[in-house]
Amino acid sequence: EAGVTQFPSHSVIEKGQTVTLRCDPISGHDNLYWYRRVMGKEIKFLLHFVKESKQDESGMPNNRFLAERTGGTYSTLKVQPAELEDSGVYFCASSRGLVTEAFFGQGTRLTVV
Amino acid sequence: DAKTTQPTSMDCAEGRAANLPCNHSTISGNEYVYWYRQIHSQGPQYIIHGLKNNETNEMASLIITEDRKSSTLILPHATLRDTAVYYCIVRVAARGSNYKLTFGKGTLLTVNP
């Protein structure tokens, strides 16, 4: 069984540009989460999808971040326009249901210069 | 979700058991205890979780005190590859609840040869 896949693994963009991160969850997992860790800080929750619906987006920092999960399969997280403070590692995770464990991808390291 | 307290760091000799404590004195009756770890800059890895009974899997054992106010993660035979930051997380896991994981600073476990 393939794990959670994230693309790209690294991205370096200039301030003001747009970047789109992609996450492919484990097949059959309805729950998909985005987290991020900025330099020196703890891993923070961004949002949670159940299938294609946003269950909780309380962790999204501002309206420059847009997450989608069309069709309830893969998800994208777009940052537009990117700012310096958006630099960090963005993790995606998926889980099958209520108490089951969440499996994380390897993350996308985003650097905004 | 209840707050957890973990030691900042611990050392363990290779081949010995590593016992990582976690305090969660404000845990609610419907909150589970989860353990994850992050090896270097990889994505967090699920280890084990439990509600009130002790649990064991191929990676570790989880011992939860009878009053559920604390728990201990046990790696029976630590190897160098177990060097990582270990996170103890409590989370409600019920339909309609928020499934997000709240990461703290965790415990840096260093396994020494």
Image (cartoon, rainbow, N blue to C red):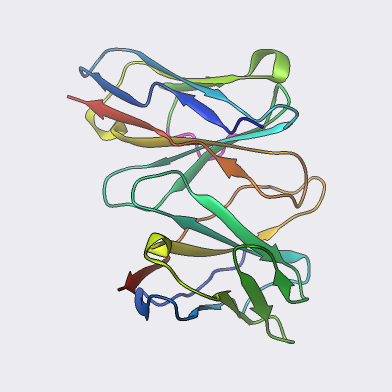
Q: Quadrant of residue B79?
A: bottom left
**Which residue is farthest right?**
B95
Residue B101 locus on image (x, y percent): 58, 52
The image shows residue B88, relative to residue A24, as above or below, that is below
Could you tell whether A53 is left or right of B108 in the image?
A: right
Q: Main secondary structure of the magenta part?
A: loop
**Which quadrant holds the C terminus of chain B?**
bottom left
The image shows residue A81, relative to residue A48, as above or below, that is above
Q: Quadrant of residue A94?
A: top right
Total count of labels: 0
Q: Is residue A78 magenta?
A: no
Please give the name of the residue rendered at 63% of the width and 76% of the height, measured from the top-left corner: B26
Residue B103 locus on image (x, y percent): 49, 56
**Which quadrant holds the N terminus of chain B?**
bottom right
Please give the name of the residue rendered at 82% of the width and 47% of the height, measured from the top-left corner: B95
Q: Quadrant of residue A64?
A: top left
Residue A52 locus on image (x, y percent): 71, 21
Could you tell whether B1 is left or right of B113 in the image?
A: right
The range drawn in magenta is A57-61
Please give the name of the residue rendered at 63% of the width and 45% of the height, measured from the top-left corner: A102
Could you tell whether A48 is left or right of B105 in the image?
A: right
In the image shown, does B6 or B3 lie closer to the viewer? B6
Residue A66 locus on image (x, y percent): 49, 20
The image shows residue B42, relative to residue B107, as above or below, that is above
Res B71 seen here = yes
Res A68 seen here = no
The image shows residue B38, relative to residue A89, as above or below, that is below
Please give the name of the residue rendered at 49% of the width and 63% of the height, measured from the top-left corner: B87
